[in-house]
Image: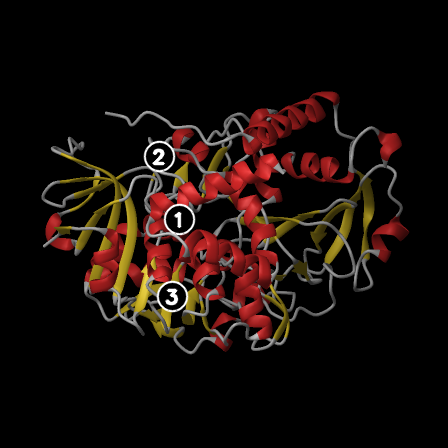
Amino acid sequence: MTDLGYTADEIMTVAAARQLRDNMVCFVGIGLPSAAANLARLSHAPEVVLIYESGTIGAKPDVLPLSIADGELSETALSVVSVPEMFRYWLQGGRIDVGFLGAAQIDRFANINTTIIGDYRKPTTRLPGGGGAPEIATSAREIFVMLRMSPRAFVAKLDFVTSLGHGSGGASRAAAGAQGRGPTRIVTDLGILSPDPESRELELASIHPGISVEQAKAACGWPLRIAEGLAETPAPTEVELATLRNFKSRSEAAGTGRPQRAKAPS
Amino acid sequence: MAEITSLAEAVRHLIQDGDSVAFEGFTHLIPSAAALEAIRQGKRDLTLIRMTPDLIYDQIIGMGLARKLVFAWGGNPGVGSLHRLREAIEQDWPRPLEIDERSHSNMANAYAAGASGLPFAVFRGHIGDDLPKVNPTIKRIACPFTGEQLAAVPAMRPDVGVIHAQRADRRGNVLLWGIVGVQKEVVLAAKRSIVTVEEVVERLEAPPNACILPHFTVGAVCLVPRGAWPSYAQGYYKRDNGFYKAWDGISRERGTFQAWMTRHVMGTGNFADFEASLKSAAKEALRD
């Protein structure tokens, strides 16, 4: 990828950022989604409303927060509400257009696992858990997911369903009582996947420049379907890359600095 | 009625072995000093409750003082795993840890039900996920008006709620601002409570809609400046992201974790000494 002038993570972040539009209300998950959502806000979608489950509504961080509740978020937010209010009025109340989630593992129907690998009671790997994701996944109008593609991440069967995607496919998600359209785009380092409108099985809808279909298939733990009219993701523009790199370098400079004493507001 | 007291005294009297204790804080205002004092005093067989367990729960669990963990997301935000929590679950070290796992929405609603004096919380959640299969406290209930199936969980009523706030006045009224998480609900839901604060002032001078815990809702108020470090207190100090990254190395192996706890926590008498101990270790590291 080096000869393309950007990294795999950079095109993934740029491709994910492009999915957000001005005035969308986006519930931002921890990790990769936060970088993408802020890139959108700093480039083509300055009016996107970023909500973090820590309670910050309309956060406009100047540097990438390390957690979902850094001071950078509350100091730049339009409003800060309590966590019970966030989940009751804002998420459950139906105010969220897009839930933007990360994942450790995903299956062909875009169900997500961030809980355990192995047996629940005696896991080989204990992952952090669901946090806000189980209800974000079943309450927002649609869901975007971001994760790197590999056979360990794109698995035929999840050991645990942390957050519902399209269940067992077809109409099973709605039958379970979930709100919203569920996962509509899975943005990876190799391409973008979308569910088939009927079966709800994920298919490769767009492939990043320089990536072959064979590479994407090899990085998927089930026989990956390719959408009719497979698109090529437009390469990141110079402006997109410069904005992302500026944001990242500002964040790194801030992240390694020593904490400063701030004056208490009177 | 709030008593203004030392942290050591508050922990000694208000936290008992075997208690369920919620040291709450959502990245902001994490009650680090209070948790370290509970470790120093060897409070044991604790049921720890927290939406987002982080470093302080890694420390209590790694010291073998917790019996059970009630939680929704256990990690070092932006850094990776909590190694002591993982080893307790994956290897039963230093002792087995019982798990009661939920979602954030579940816990936020359960705390609010506790604060409201209700027996249970109802919310639209746990739809199609596997948590209800492994957690018998998550049940379904039909709405009596529409028939919609909703999630029901018992109210969260910790024996002790422990939080950190920016300010208290001399009567023990507490003021917090910024990301306030579930801290108000925790104190109102708990049977007993401890609040550490950055400063004690004559007058709170808070705006009318501020997040305030009146003195009659709080057990003990303890003055512990910087008591939320390495998390932050808005208006006082920033989050020490560098220490969260450093914790990954300190906690990865049992030996380095135990040496760090022995020197800096068990080997110090209070939070100020603990911070001084870390500073002198940092100076030594620079010399070497």
Q: What element carries label 2?
A: loop
Residue, disc 1: B26
Q: Tell me what residue is drawn at x 55 percent, y 72 percent.
A: B93
User: Label 3 neighbourhood size at 10 Å, few (<14), some (14-19), many (20+)?
Assistant: many
**N-terminal label among 1 and 2:** 1
- Which chain is mark 3 on? B
Residue, disc 2: B234
**N-terminal label among 3 and 2:** 3
- Which chain is mark 2 on? B
Q: In screen coordinates, is A73 left or right of A254?
A: left
Which amino acid type corresponds to the residue marked 1 in the rendered image? Phe
Q: In the rendering, which numbered label is found on residue B48? A: 3
Q: Looking at the figure, which quarter contains the N terminus of chain B?
A: bottom left
Q: What element carries label 3?
A: strand
Quarter-of-image position of residue B178: top left
Would residue A27 be visible to someone looking at this image?
A: no
Question: Looking at the picture, does residue A239 appear above or below residue B247?
Answer: above
Q: In the rendering, which numbered label is found on residue A150? A: none
Q: Tell me what residue is drawn at x 26 percent, y 47 percent.
A: B196
Closer mark to the observer between disc 1 and disc 3: 3
Q: In screen coordinates, is B82 left or right of B266?
A: right
Residue B24, position in %: x, y? 35, 54
Using the rendered image, report if marks 1 and 3 lie on a common chain: yes
Rounded to the nearest angstrom, the CA distance separating label 3 from label 2 is 25 Å
Q: Looking at the figure, which quarter contains the C terminus of chain B?
A: top right
Q: What element carries label 1?
A: loop
